[in-house]
Amino acid sequence: MSSLVLLFGVFFVLLLLGTPIIFSLGAAAMVVLASIDLLSPQLVMQRVYAGLDSFPMLAIPFFMAAGALMEHGGISRRLVNFSSYLVGWISGGLGHVAVIASTIFAGISGSAVADTTAIGSTMIPMMKRRGYDASFSAAVVAASGVIGPIIPPSIPLVLYGVVSGVSIGALFMGGIIPGLMMTIGLMVLIYTKAKRSNWDIEAEPFTYAGLWKSFIAAAGALVMPIIIVGGILGGVFTATEAAVVATVYALLVGLFWYRELSFSQLPELFYSAGLNTAVVMVIVGVANLVGYVLTIEQLPLLLSEWFSAHITNVLILLLVINILLLIAGCFLDGGSAIIVFTPVLLPVVTSFGIDPVFFGVMMTVNLMIGTVTPPVGLSLYIASGIADISITQICKAIFPFLLVQLVVLTLITLFPEIVLFIPKQFYNF
């Protein structure tokens, strides 16, 4: 256990000193290797490369590229327009529009930051013009962005699947119901707040003609989640191959259907997607080095034995883990936290008979809530920047939405079948 203390001690000290997470992770792992006389450049580079040498990892660059293509191809504007006709007539109309548009975009991007940026750049100015409070508008969009990595596709779930060896397709299916629960919960909160604040005047008039017209305009975007989920469920392609299909489809839609993409834009978009992918990949490689350190020191086994000796109730274990991850999510981005904590916690939960698919989805929901918790919540900074408000203002406004998300996390923790229902219909457990 002294190695575990040394590993995380060095890691968090460097992190608090402002050291980038990649260097904090690498330095912590090498300090432990040096303490047991195993540090060598060849070993370090071999373990880093081994973490990247995985076929499922190809899903990350392709989903990054697909998200970039759809974001710049006029997709978000069409989704907002369709959502406006679909739910804009409900009390608190534009708030519901933001949630629904984010939910649909979640089936395209797989990223909370991309979701918040794409929908927020359209919705927040629109809500402010219609008289909505700026902090409320920003909070709605930031909270809705949490849905992005829960509903498939999901880059954090891909990372968990690679690290844990669990079926990424099953993880994708496990995220559907929790993601929809979060959508409904946020809409109930917005409706309640609208009624109390007398926002009925903000509702859009409903017309079937407008709904149909907006549906046809957004059809290219709406088909994409169906292709991804349907293809995986139907066994047509794997989750990794689905990322390639999504990229090709997004390219064709942007260039030839919506015609808002041009060939001259592609190098910049692919460069941006490649840059984002490189950041994730380097962290994955270094995290594999950390996993190697944990393995040779038998830290997961020791931790599992410690939990078994001190905790006998599964719910207590999950409560402790949820609290640990919620705290970690305040300081680490979700992808990094998944890579760091999965090798440590997965052996513990499996020793208690907890399904790894359920645990992966629960962990992802938990850590994605971190995108809207200070001090490192990226979605908070993006939404507050678009709304031109201080981080303090959005932190106050986000609190009710945060409570809704914690309720969803509690429900899936207490009732794992919420997560496992759909995967059990298509995968052998």
Image (cartoon, grey):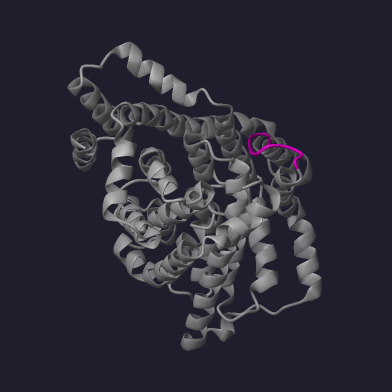
Residue at 77 percent across and 39 percent down: it is: 236
Residue closer to the observer: 308 or 120: 308
Q: Is residue 153 visible to us here?
A: no
Of residues 346 and 101, the one drawn nearer to the viewer in this rendering: 346
Q: Is residue 70 above or below residue 289?
A: below
Instruction: Please tell me in which quadrant of the rendered image residue 228 appears.
Output: top right
Residue 222, visible in the rendered structure: yes
Picture residue at 59% right of the left edge, 75% below the top: 93
Q: Position of residue 260 (x, y in %)?
A: 69, 44
Quarter of the rendering occupied by the N terminus:
top left
Q: Is residue 423 left or right of residue 7?
A: right
Give the quarter of the image for residue 254: top right
Location of residue 420 by image quarter: bottom right
Residue 287 lies left or right of residue 306; in this view the side is right
- The boundaries of the magenta stretch are 235-241
Q: Is residue 244 shown left or right of residue 36?
A: right
All told, the count of numbered labels is: 0
Q: Give x and y (percent) for residue 107.
A: 63, 52
Q: Nearer the viewer, residue 15 or 222?
A: 15
- Above or below residue 320? Residue 429 is above
Residue pictured at 71% horizontal, 35% vertical: 248
Does 216 appear in magenta?
no
Q: Position of residue 216 (x, y in %)?
A: 80, 59
Q: Position of residue 318 (x, y in %)?
A: 38, 57
- Using the image, determine if residue 43 lies above or below residue 403: above
Q: Is residue 236 magenta?
A: yes
